[in-house]
Amino acid sequence: MILRFQRGTTVRTMQSVRARIESEGLRVFESPETQRPILAIVDKTPPALFKELEARPDVENVAVPKASWRLIAPEYRDSQTRIRLGKVEIGPDTVIVIAGPCSVEGTDTMDEVARKVAKSGAQLLRGGAFKPRTSPYAFQGFGVEGLRQLKDAGEKFELPVVTEIMDASDVGAFLNHDIDCFQIGARNMQNFRLLKAVARAGKAVLLKRGLAATVEEWLYAAEYLAAGGCRDIILCERGIRTFETATRNTLDLTVLPLLREMTHLPVIVDPSHAAGLARLVAPLSRASIAVGAQGVAVEVHPTPSQARSDGPQALLPHELTSLVADARIQAAISGRRLA
Amino acid sequence: MILRFQRGTTVRTMQSVRARIESEGLRVFESPETQRPILAIVDKTPPALFKELEARPDVENVAVPKASWRLIAPEYRDSQTRIRLGKVEIGPDTVIVIAGPCSVEGTDTMDEVARKVAKSGAQLLRGGAFKPRTSPYAFQGFGVEGLRQLKDAGEKFELPVVTEIMDASDVGAFLNHDIDCFQIGARNMQNFRLLKAVARAGKAVLLKRGLAATVEEWLYAAEYLAAGGCRDIILCERGIRTFETATRNTLDLTVLPLLREMTHLPVIVDPSHAAGLARLVAPLSRASIAVGAQGVAVEVHPTPSQARSDGPQALLPHELTSLVADARIQAAISGRRLA
Amino acid sequence: MILRFQRGTTVRTMQSVRARIESEGLRVFESPETQRPILAIVDKTPPALFKELEARPDVENVAVPKASWRLIAPEYRDSQTRIRLGKVEIGPDTVIVIAGPCSVEGTDTMDEVARKVAKSGAQLLRGGAFKPRTSPYAFQGFGVEGLRQLKDAGEKFELPVVTEIMDASDVGAFLNHDIDCFQIGARNMQNFRLLKAVARAGKAVLLKRGLAATVEEWLYAAEYLAAGGCRDIILCERGIRTFETATRNTLDLTVLPLLREMTHLPVIVDPSHAAGLARLVAPLSRASIAVGAQGVAVEVHPTPSQARSDGPQALLPHELTSLVADARIQAAISGRRLA
Amino acid sequence: MILRFQRGTTVRTMQSVRARIESEGLRVFESPETQRPILAIVDKTPPALFKELEARPDVENVAVPKASWRLIAPEYRDSQTRIRLGKVEIGPDTVIVIAGPCSVEGTDTMDEVARKVAKSGAQLLRGGAFKPRTSPYAFQGFGVEGLRQLKDAGEKFELPVVTEIMDASDVGAFLNHDIDCFQIGARNMQNFRLLKAVARAGKAVLLKRGLAATVEEWLYAAEYLAAGGCRDIILCERGIRTFETATRNTLDLTVLPLLREMTHLPVIVDPSHAAGLARLVAPLSRASIAVGAQGVAVEVHPTPSQARSDGPQALLPHELTSLVADARIQAAISGRRLA
């Protein structure tokens, strides 16, 4: 259950209530909410305690979210999450474009891409240093050296950077290179140890939906991050597995408006991996923002045919510029702005 | 293969080439294309004949579509299909909104809905007279009486009407009631006898994608219609079956831009059946048009809670008005207009 | 609800109760059960009537099946359905093998196959006369002539025959040729008009599961048949559509033991269409019978490479003989026998 | 490509060929095959080198497996893999039953279960110490203490033990407790760092198929293990995600006979997680062995209703005894024996 106090309730009062609840052996979390104290009890609350809490005059209401996640439920906050990465704000009022190569492939290419990304008007730079590859013999990324190249390029063009972390033992390297946003990839969405380790790092996290994860499982994975102390969580829809083979995956835009009712977290869309074909990326990006996504993440490469991975789905720089322009229009007609 | 003649080639020349091909025992179709004659050979063309045809001076080029459908392939036309229903044009330059109740439920309700549909700015009226229902004990529609009520309401408010046909034996009743567009439902997409019978009726057809049909199967179903003589075919994506249970179906918007390369036929989207929830319909409609759909088909009811079927997904009339306004904006920013 | 009377209750008593229920405007069906009268009410029973019926001394118990089908529910019978086709019994004590070519292709081939099918020990002969084909240009079967060839071959070798019906208008031809069992194909599982027409024909029906039909939808399709008067219904699992592309479909054997609790109807398995490869058919047949299926339906052809359809999944005659031997063993160890 | 030398070729010759190949910068692996040397080249072999190797008189043949995995391909071995865990042999001639509770829950219960498992005739003991749970608030297992309890119980009843490892940092604890077989769970099938770490541990590995993994991805995950030095790999099918909600997952037995052609590794089936219901486990186990699986892994609990996880799918001890008896029969009729 979630306990929402009256506005004006003091932290001291809230702390005493918290102590009362914990004395029953229940686990309690405090919302970072500033307008009022909010507490989430994650264990089953005994009926007597439930009534006692509900009856307190300083409690405005108690909410029981439909599902059993708590910290990411809308009821745990007074407004949707706003995340700040450098000058970029991700949240209900803004639309972001994250762009970059599938893999970091060397300083020169990385700098060239970053320049184009900055110029296009996109807000964040992406690029894979640790690559999860189906085959053990495929290129597995530049590793820590890739982190350095990505961050250097990001700093040169004032772009916060996002990149995937594949193992708890790499958290230190990510922190050393001041990676702004840690990405949890689709294949690791239920790597619960990794979720716990990344949550402790105190950085923003981009959590991709698993290849065939239900919305419920995805939100529970986000709850793992939240329960571990992470507040800045961005969900990223990237297509699910279906019987249809005409496209690589099927982008599940149907759940986007539903997610808005299930969580206070921002949700973006990665159309590149769903489509698998660059020419589908622009229309799918427009559709994503039209349906309510807070942004898109796309792949871009100066010469896609030479990319070390996923070339067929990479945009050319001028296509990215056009995509950002479209995003600006879609943001505007929905009363938002590019971040 | 598809044989595209030079512009200016006479019908007489084309007919003699056609006779030549048929003399080899191959089946040939003539395109309705006005800019030049185009022939499609649907059987495998022997290499010698292929070369002979390709070498003719009056042949501009021969095309071999990637898939083995012919009459719906882009190569069979010089431009995308334009369909006219009354004053409404469906095609590359326009966006349409089809609206109406799930089931026709009586003259009064039908008239009330039709008035609201007309007022909202939607272009076509829908409503089910023959209802395919999972259970044999569920309401199966008003049948022929429903056709009459629907058509009457359409005439009163100058809206062409679309409704589902479930069996070849009903073609006569549909023609008698001058139904403007025959809908083939998802469950009948591969009811090949029905496709053949409907094709012969000479009316426009709205072909829904099967519940779990691949794009390829869907296009072959359209080819059945085309091979039977039907030219005015509208494809309708309505969501596919996936493991996700948060929504009724998963709208497959990912294939929309791909369909543009696979066929000259217009494609619209039915977000009501995919979402199963009225409040998801507006954002999904925006996304559908943003991704390139030529229209949307939605359900509307004056009092959804009293609808005889699918109430939870029906819009209120004022929500339809707002949806049409959104469609107008999305049409405009993509260089199109409401039909 | 289902009303089970005490053993020994007279038909007269039952009829008066039936009249009482119908006087409330509810639709009632009588079970063919011989051990006692059983009635199924398919509309929602008002609470007062429910109590009244439950309280009658001649009523042993009232059952409310979990799902809202009635006539195919286990509660509607005292034992599982037994179907007799010629000398063959299909039901809880027996295992059947249905075999034959994908398409009927001519008298000579048909006779040759039938001879081999009879010799192998299989009990029923199959072969498609009307073929549902994805492409309008593919071979669509020999039609009525195919029915004749199939039936002639069946009579020559004393094998009852099973073949697919695709349209209500063919029922007459099927009856004229004395087809023993009408097959409803996967693509027509929810062709509700066809289900109603076939039910009226009074013959046994083999109902294939739709390409992506849920078990619930499949059972409702069977209920359409039952509500139309058909008693001899055989369900046939043939693989469902999944993301896996290594095989044509994924045979859903997981639901087989569950079906036993959901219906009194026999269930068989068609492993040929699921696998798409002949060499997978034998092990999948063994698994089907091991998991509880009452039989299998497989394709066989003297020279698969020359089959007009689905050659790659057809067994050779000697492979069929071996498959029947395996079926006999699996039947024996589960306390059953070949039919 | 895979290079198969003549029988009798010396290790010295093979080593010189290997050096020749490596001098071209290609990665080479040596098969543990005893009948002849076999080398696998995992990078693309230049045509000239390919011809040179093929032409050598001591090379019997070069094979290019259909897919690009190498070390798990049938061509890399002269016979199917045989794995020995204590006295138990897993391979082409045997059938195994792995049984135990979903979670290790305390010494007493563990010992009781182990006694029953041993008595039933099952060969291996399973039990989860580290539990991957969808919710962060659910019971996450006893951790290292659970490893100890499981191993103690295994030793007491002479049963080798299998348990899931969730993170590379736990490899030490697994080795300290002499866990006989490390299980990689479905959610971690593509946790590539974990695969690499576990491969280095030198123990047998049970690799579950991912929740919606294709066979191809699953085999590549096994190749990660093999490339990291692991030879004793057991594949475990556990059901895939489909649209069907009647059962928890859909067991994909259709691919079992196909896997036999794709790899030399043993494959077992876990019917408990697919079915989600204990009463489906026995028939699905019979089907699994009938279709060719080398064993099954099932859950058992003395009082399922009190199990800390997955109670509804746990067998009672006497049901396990019956399941082992069935497995013995299915093994016998396919010319195999219980391990």
Image (cartoon, coloured by chain):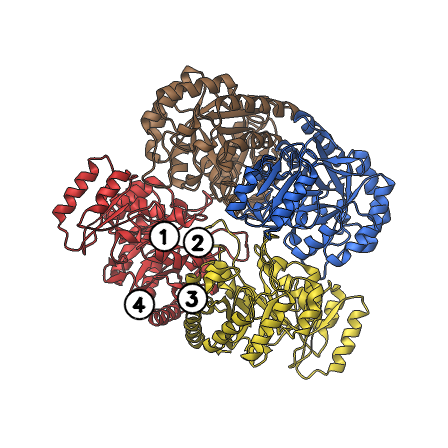
Chain colours: A red, B yellow, C blue, D brown
Residue hosting label 2: A309
Query: Disc 3 sits on a residue from what chain?
Result: B
Distance between mark 4 and mark 1 Cα atoms:
24 Å
Discs 3 and 4 carry the same chain letter? no
Chain on which label 2 sits: A
Label 4 sits on residue? A338
Could you tell me which residue is drawn at 51 percent across and 19 percent down? D120
* Residue D283: image location, x then y, percent: 58, 31
How far apart marks 3 and 2 lie (CA) works out to 37 Å
Image label count: 4
Image coordinates for residue C181, horizontal then vertical, percent:
76, 45
Which comes before the other along the chain, label 2 or label 1?
1
Closest to the observer, A36 or A232: A36
Does the image show residue D175?
yes
- Whole-number angstrom distance, CA of label 3 to CA of label 1: 36 Å
Question: Which residue in the structure is indicated by mark 1?
Answer: A128
Decide which of tag 2 and tag 4 comes sooner along the chain.
Answer: 2
Q: Amino acid at mark 2?
A: Ser
In the depicted view, which residue is nearer to us: B244 or B101?
Answer: B101
The residue indicated by pointer 3 is: B282
Task: Establish whether labels 2 and 1 are both on one chain.
Answer: yes
Is residue D3 something one can see in this rendering? no
